[in-house]
Image (cartoon, grey):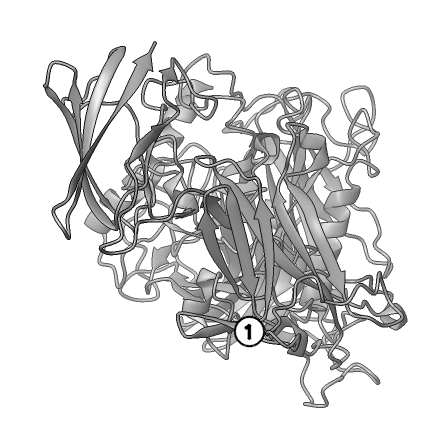
Amino acid sequence: MYFKLFFFAFTLQLFAQERSIRRVQTASDEYDKYTSVGNLGLTITNFGILGNGWNRMEDGSINPSCQYKQQTEIPREQIEHFSYSGLWVGGIVNGERRVSTSIVDGVFESGSEGFELFAKSPIAIQSSISSTTQDSMAQYYSPTAVSHQDIIANFSDYGDSFNDGQGIPNHNPLGIDIRLESYAWNYSYADAFVILNYTFRNISQDTINNIYTGIWADPSVANFNYTDYYTPGGGFTWYDNLNVFDETVDNAGFSRDIAVQFDTDGDDGWAESYIGISILGSSIPYRYLDTHYNQWVWTNSSNSDYPAYSMPINDSERYDKMSSSVPKGVGPEYTSEGYPSAENSWLFLVSAGPLGSVPSMDTTNWALPPGDSCSISFTVVCGLWSDGFSSDSPGRRSNLHVNYDWAQKAYDGEDKNRNNQLDEGEDTNENQIIDRYILPAPPPAPNMHVELESNKVTLYWQNNSEFFRDPISQEKDFEGYRIYGARKTDNEALGEFSLLLEVDRENTIGYNTGFTTVGIRNEYGGKDSVLFEGVYYHYKFVNEGIKDGWINYYAVTAYDQGDPDANLESLESSIYSNRVFVFPGKPEAEENLWIGMPTVYPNPYRGQAEWDGYGSRNKMIWFRNLPKEAEIRIFSLAGDLVEIIQHDDSYKGKDISNIDAQKNPLMSGGEHAWDLITMHDQATASGLYLFTVEDKKSGQIKEGKFLIIK
């Protein structure tokens, strides 16, 4: 078990270092991009692999590999689902089976059989989000974007020419260029899946027949707030997982065909989630596309317990796996759905075909001639276990099914019956082509501005949500706003947000409160706005009684009226799209108006403040009533210099490990935290300390003192 973990911890660094040595590349390998707009954080590379093996990036951070939910502040729901997965694609060329793979079991050395796809260009990112000021995707806005976050990668299975296998043993390239476009959304109903659209173009001189392609996955559902996956004995194991091929039927009468894995005991409530991968459709009609499922134990090519469930070891066997399904079993060794009931380090492969651009007369065979292209779309989808079920069942997978069905609806778009052609009534915009990736859209989250004071947070937002037209109904169906704050209790069952206020239009729908309580008014009672940094804001909400020095968070969402005719409930913008983290506190002193003395809180500091973590570097006190630019000097009672702190009003807490800088929290400008570590990198001792604060603009110096009791 730990052998596998050790190598997986370093694989991507080996890719980056060794792959560039052994071959001529047109682009550098990239493995630091991941879907970030929704709740499913999936690493996308430009060499065919998905996931990052839970590897640390160069800056020491760990990006999501396949994490759901990545946005939540509830630790039990921050669940990882696989270390790696990757593309396999095979076809028949001149009677020979050829398969190109991005990754296979147990191969960690670059240049070895299995690592056979090569980056062709840098990853590109584009977004359909253009105006939300809190959303970082706006910087990637493109009118051609499909989703809130398109990640686009181009790679191939050959080197300098279509038959150049780069010296990899047993690798005979198909000679294909591959384009991956991944799509992710931040809608609350569509944030648990990522769609992967692969296009294969034959650049060789030979026709490729009967292409089959699939995604190989090495899942292990685990929560790293509960287990330690690097340290032997840390509680993490690959060997407590089960798989199932979910063939339940959706509301349209189609089989879902999802390859699924889950942790059998849910790790005491810390890993109660499913990972699923499925085919949504392809460039050939759905009725001609066969989906196949296989699973085997990690690196096990001869399974005595389950002989049919064995790892393929060459291209012919890999092609056979992709073009057929493992037989189901009967008896105590199998689940009720026919799959092994023994927990283990199970992998799976979900595949489909045959693909091509030219069908045979009976459409049972497809060819891809030189220069032609074909495509296929997969989805990676997650879902928390549904309550009330003690073991795996279709009922417990209901959240997974709901999330998958939205992915399928997104892919289908106008093609409601999945026949790859426009039938009567389907071409809603009358442009004579099938428009895919159409989702009902809530109004966008309003653009927001936040002002901080001591014990007080004021939210301002614009009215941009109110002018949004639903892409399906073409109606302006905005209904109201909801204002959320951080959960007020330790009860995770209540969720991570508290609803602070809801307001809606005065009509025949909803509460009909109107917007009087949040609308900004002038002295005559008329509608008005306030100006911040050249932008006008139309509404405000004040939250008082907030503790200084504690992190808090807020969001304002917009929701619509719903569409009963389309059987759609009211849709709400993502609660995460404009969430802002804040540390309330005293604002910085205005220039030449530094009134009062700087202070420290808590004072005295008694051993450990409630906001402290458990490590020696996770402690914190706050200096307050600071000027815009200041130098803080801390001295022992004997006069020894303990620490020097440079402060300005753009301070974000990056010098304090107890503050998560990745949340980019807003701070008041007049406060600065200290972690009680001296300039000599030592923990401070108990005692009385003196400090000075110098206003860097005026040169004025003020003094204070505080007490540490450990």
Where residue 287 sits, quadrant-wise, is bottom right
Q: Is residue 425 above or below residue 44?
A: below
Residue 54 pos. (x, y %): 42, 35
666 shown above or below 132:
above
Would residue 325 be found to the left or right of residue 115 on screen?
A: right
Quarter of the rendering containing residue 640: top left
Judging depth in this view, the residue of 680 and 418 nearest the camera is: 680
Image coordinates for residue 160, horizontal then vertical, percent: 26, 64
Q: What residue is at 85 percent from the left and 72 percent from the top?
A: 507
- Badge 1 is on which residue? 529
Can you give x and y, in whole percent of width and height, for residue 260 in the image?
68, 39
Q: Is residue 536 visible?
A: yes
The amino acid type of the residue labelled 1 equals Ser
Q: Is residue 100 visible from the viewing direction of this image?
A: no
Please give left or right for residue 117 compared with residue 496 in the image.
left
**Structural crowding at the residue carrying mark 1, measured as other residues with C-alpha within 10 Å and reported as few (<14), some (14–19) or many (≥20):** some
